[in-house]
Image: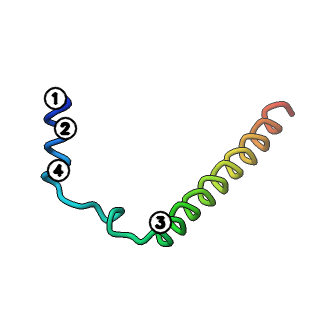
């Protein structure tokens, strides 16, 4: 696909739910995503440390 086709496809799709959110709702949604990513990173780090400790015993 070329770039023009991608732009036309996006226009044909209509408005996205993100575009219909108010600014406050967007900020709330973005903060929720940030917190979820931080939790996932923390869980990954903890699991990696625990697994690493087990392999060196």
Quarter of the rendering occupied by the C terminus: top right
Residue that lies at the very extreme toward the front in this rendered image: 23
Left or right: where 30 falls relative to 53:
left
**Residue position marked by numbered label 3 in the rendering:** 26
Label 3 secondary element: helix
Tally the marks: 4
Quick one: label 2, few (<14), some, or many (20+) residues within 10 Å? few
Q: Which residue is mark 2?
A: 6
Question: Which colour assignment does the render follow?
Answer: rainbow
Which label belongs to residue 40?
A: none
Classify mark 3: residues with Cα within 10 Å, few (<14), some (14-19) or many (20+). Answer: some
Mark found first going from the N terminus, 3 or 2? 2
- Give percent across and percent down for residue 41: 66, 48
Q: Label 2 vs label 1: CA separation?
A: 7 Å
In the rendered image, which quarter is residue 28 located in? bottom right
Residue at the (16%, 29%) spot, across then down: 1
Disc 4 is placed on an element classified as helix
* Image location (x, y in percent) of residue 51: 75, 40
Q: Are marks 3 and 2 in contact (CB under 8 Å)?
A: no
First in sequence: mark 4 or mark 1?
1
């Amino acid at each position: 696909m070329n770039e023009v086709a991608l732009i036309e496809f996006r226009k044909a799709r209509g408005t996205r739910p993100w575009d219909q959110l108010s600014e406050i709702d967007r900020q709330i949604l973005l903060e929720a995503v940030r917190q979820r990513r931080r939790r996932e990173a923390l869980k990954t780090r903890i699991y990696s440390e625990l697994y690493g400790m087990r392999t060196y015993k």
